[in-house]
Structures are given as structure tokens and as C-alpha cells.
Image: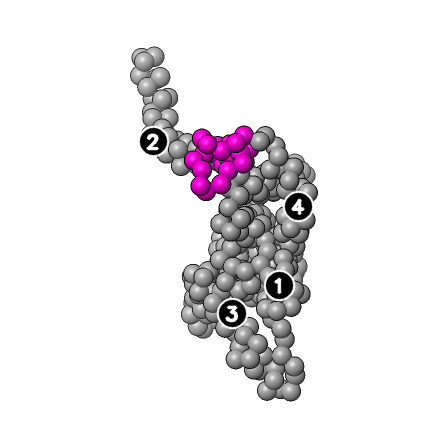
Amino acid sequence: MSVAIKANRLTPYMFLAPAGIILIFALLYPIGYMIYASFLDWSPSQRIGQAEFIGFRNYVNLWGDEAFRESFWVTIRFAAIVVTLEMVLGVGLALLLDRNIKGMAMLRTVFILPMMIAPIVVGLMWRYMYHPTVGIFNRTLKNFGFEGIPWLSDSTWSFIAIVIADVWQWTPFIFILALAAMQSLPRSALEAAEIDGANEWQKIVMIKLPLMMPVLIVTLLLRLIDAFKVLEVILVLTNGGPGLSTEILALRIFRTAQEFQELGEAAAMSNLLLMMLMALTIGMFAYSRVQEARLARQRAAVEKDAD
């Protein structure tokens, strides 16, 4: 009898074992390889076993590298701006379109089209639209008697250009998840609020957004992680220029490995980016847990008062 019980307890682990083995080789091994490579002075002409072990020199060099620090702050600024804009626009569109209107299904389909386009195509498309002479933006401005904007040749406007392109492509992602979360809300809570005389704005602030918060936190986390890794669109649009005004860390890592052929330093950058994203993820989940615990205490207090 005890043998059968033990076998039943081990059964789930037996089913999970193949996936666990694949995870170890497909995820943990590359991460370990990258961590080891970050302690080496390694170039593409060498095998990893021939590279010189230099300890933490790559990490020390990075913090003294002005180009790396500039790319780091460009990444922080870019991720903060695009994710904030996308969350506001995505949730706002979801609130606006969460109603029965004729043709709404078609409109929702149109909204999600940008995220279906390959990043390289998005970069080329926006590059043509930002063209100083034949681009649609400058041609429209000139038709109305205004001067053209140096979209890709000025550091400030280049940063704005990549923000616009990213917001255009990924706001639909926020919109889809926010709309799905909104449509899964319990109707009883909304009906109770209507009976109590709550207007539409009060229902949004006091009921819809708090109930959607777990989904919104996960959505925010996913977009933040992805915003730190944007590469193709910026590579096609500006290639990090003018200067380093649009060079985010992912592009810096790519150029360090491909152009400068410093694989050890590129691995060290990747590790720093990974640690930053892990800290961000842990912080977001900790905040989510605190919020869930607070809501649980509030529900318990309400039920106690009702008794």
C-alpha cells in the first residue's frame, strides 16, 4: 500500500521530468555559459577554452565606459516612456471599446494589426515615413506651410521617433490583455455599483481598475521586459544614432559582439541586463503579492463587519 502511495506521489514528477531536463539544457546551460564567458577576454577568433580568464575586469571596464552608461540611461528612459504611454493608451482604448457597438469586432481586429507585423518591417515602414523629403510626415507639414522635422538626424527627434514607432506597434498588446481582463470582470460588482448610483468614472476607478490590477501588473512586467530588449526597430530606424542618443543596451550588446568583437564584454553587458530584469520582475511580483494580501485583508474585514 505504501509503495502505491509513493508511486502516486512520484507520478507528477515523472511527467515533469522531460520538461525539466529540456529547461536545464535550453535555458540554464546558456545562462551559465554566458556568465562564464563574462569573466573571459574572448574574441570570435578563439575557442572559449583558449580565452584568457580575467575575473571581473569586464564588469569594471563597463562601469568606466561612458558609452555603456549612456546606453544604460537611454534604455531606462526609453522603457519608462514607451511602457507608460502604452499602458495609458492600451487601457484607455480597452475602456472605450468595452461596449456593444456595431462594427466593434472589426475595429478590434484593426487595432491589433500593428503587433502582427515583423519588427524589421515596422522599422522600414517608419523609416520611409520619417524620410526628410518624401516621408509622409514632412510632406504633410510642408503642405501646410511648416518646416520639415529632422526625425532621424536630430538626437531629440530621433528618440521621439523610436518611441512613436514602439508605441504604435505594442499598444495593441496592452489593449488585448486589458480588454480580456475587463470582459472577465464579475458583472455582479458592476451591477451593484449601478444600484448604488455610481457613475461610469466611479465604476472605472473604484471597481474595474482595482479588479484588473493583477492582469495589468503582469502586462506591465511583460512590456517592461520586452522594452529593455528592443533591437530590430531601432537598428533599422537609427542604428543607435545620431551619436548614442537612441542606442539602448540590446543594440550596444549586439554592436560590442559583432562590430567590436568583444564577446566577454558583451556577455558581461548581457548579465547586467539580466540581473536588472530579474530585480524588476521580483519587485513587480512582490508588489503584486502585497496588493493581493491587502485586498484579502479588506475582504475579510468587510465580511466580518457584515456578520
Q: Nearer the viewer, mark 3 or mark 1?
A: 1
**In the foreground, 156 or 8:** 156
The mark nearer the N terminus, 2 or 4, is 2
To which residue does mark 1 refer? 242
Q: Residues within 10 Å of mark 3 (few under 14, many from 20)?
A: many
| Residue 100 can be seen, yes or no | no
Q: CA distance from mark 4 to mark 1?
A: 19 Å
Nearer to me, 91 or 212? 91
Label 3: which secondary element: helix
Where is residue 54 shown, x and y percent of the image?
A: 57, 31
Q: Nearer the viewer, mark 2 or mark 3?
A: 3
Badge 4 is on which residue? 65
Residue named by callout 2: 18
Disc 2 residue crowd, few under 14, some 14–19, many 20+, Cα 10 Å: few
Q: Position of residue 186 (x, y in %)?
A: 52, 51
Magenta segment? 31-53
Q: Is residue 99 above or below residue 2?
A: below
